[in-house]
Amino acid sequence: MKVPLEGLKKMLRGPWHKLNLPPLRAIKAFLSPRIAVGLIVVVTLMVVVFFQYRIQAVVFKKPGAKKEVAKKEEAPAPPQEPVLVKVYKVQKKDFDDSLPLLGTVKGFKEINLKFETNGVIDSINFKEGEKIETGEIIATLNQKDALLKVKYNQIELEKTQKLFDIGAIAKAKLDQVKLEMESAKREVEKTYLYAPRSGILGTKDAEAGEYITSSDKIGTFIDSKEVFVEVGIVERDIGRVKPGQKGKVTIDTYGDTEFDAVVDNVSPVVEGKSRTQTARLKVKNPKGQLLPGMFARATCAVYSAKGAIVIPNNAVDKTEEGYITFVFKKEEAPPKKEAPKGKDAKKKDKKEKESKKKEEPKEEPAKEAAAEQGIAKAKPIQPDYRAADFFVVKKGLEEGDLVVVETQEKLKDGNKIIVTETQEAGS
């Protein structure tokens, strides 16, 4: 928009221009023609923007505008397709859990066999693993020196006794000679190594002809009436095996024969290389069938409960709040409302139903469809014990509940589901 400068000057020199007030003189000095044009343009633009804003406000404030937007935002989502699942029927039952273990038979009491005196081994009368009865001689030392000493002391004792009888020596001298004789006999006894009780010879660490001292071990004696089975417990099972728990032991040599066992001791240390904790199971061995060194398979009863609610592990999910499981709930259909019918219409419907019953063959219960439709309800549960495959529930489920064990996709609370198979304990 172009405004001639002369016209603008005349406009600015209107009646108010004749006034000679001090404020007006300042304004007249400030308002040059170019500045005036700029002010007019700015004011015009401001007026246009103001009217555009008002028009938009009026349009958006039309009745029903907000409602239409809200309706678009709240448009219903497409119906969800039901998820196919398999369920497990909860039942109360007695539950026992055993931990399988592998180990080696060890002697209950292992005694290091040593002579009381020094000497050369004359004979060892048993082989490794051979049974020994109480009092039997396991080994002997060469007795020549000991027997010579006994013979010498025997001669001395006879001489001393004759001298004492004629009164040539005092009784104290006779007693001294007798003590020396007893000492010589004991030296002979020390050349024999006797079995302290019934058992077996374990390791043999010396051979006949070797010179040994009283500190040298010639073998190991093992009490075989009771034995230990020493097993290793891996880190994930540490804490499950405790003293006093009962178990069973089997040996490949004896097939399915089971030997009763009790956990006697559990080591407080985890071995560095194998990362296992050692436990000892005491086993009675009256017939001596279990020999030290045999490979043993053991089971230890780590949990037992009567009338427990047990579900498969794949029915349980871990969340931040705890454990949950999804339970199948039937979706109840709303009752159908039928329009009132007259007497003739009712009679007609009755006749049609009767004719349909006669025409349609009766279906056997076994041929009925197993699929049922419902919803998945998330239920928090409190665990009592967790085994390798099963989960013992302390609180949260009741007998007869159907818990989801297999599903095509991850479930959420309230999802529609279709049951394709119902599993039960033992099936």
Image: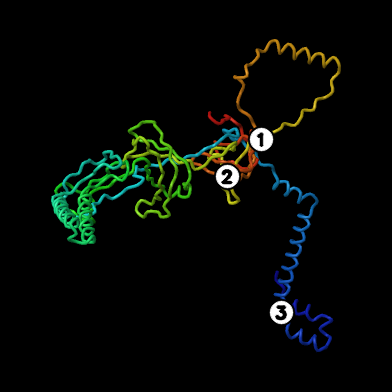
The colouring scheme, among rainbow, by chain, secondary structure or one colour, is rainbow
Give the residue at x 60% y 25%: 370
Instruction: Identify the residue position indicated by label 2 in the image.
Output: 384
Give the residue at x 73% y 73%: 40
Front position in the image: 385 or 123 = 123
Residue 381: image location, x then y, percent: 61, 44
Q: How crowded is the residue under tag 1: few (<14 C-alpha within 10 Å), some, or many (20+)?
A: some
Q: What amino acid is at disc 2?
A: Asp
Front position in the image: 424 or 414 = 424
Q: What amino acid is at disc 1?
A: Lys
Instruction: Identify the residue position indicated by label 3 in the image.
Output: 33
Quarter of the view holding residue 394: top right
Q: Nearer the viewer, mark 3 or mark 2?
A: 2
Q: Is residue 211 visible?
A: no
Give the residue at x 66% y 35%: 329
Q: Is residue 119 left or right of residue 113?
A: left
Q: Does the residue at mark 1 contact the one at mark 3 (Cβ under 8 Å)?
A: no
Mark 3 vs mark 2, CA separation in Å: 94 Å
Front position in the image: 75 or 95 = 95
Q: Secondary structure at mark 1?
A: strand
Q: How crowded is the residue under tag 3: few (<14 C-alpha within 10 Å), some, or many (20+)?
A: some
Residue 47: image location, x then y, percent: 75, 67
Give the residue at x 70% y 10%: 358
Q: What amino acid is at disc 3?
A: Pro
Q: Nearer the viewer, mark 1 or mark 2?
A: 2
Q: Secondary structure at mark 2?
A: strand
Residue 369: image location, x then y, percent: 61, 23
Quarter of the view holding residue 271: bottom left
**Chain-order first, disc 1 or disc 2:** 1
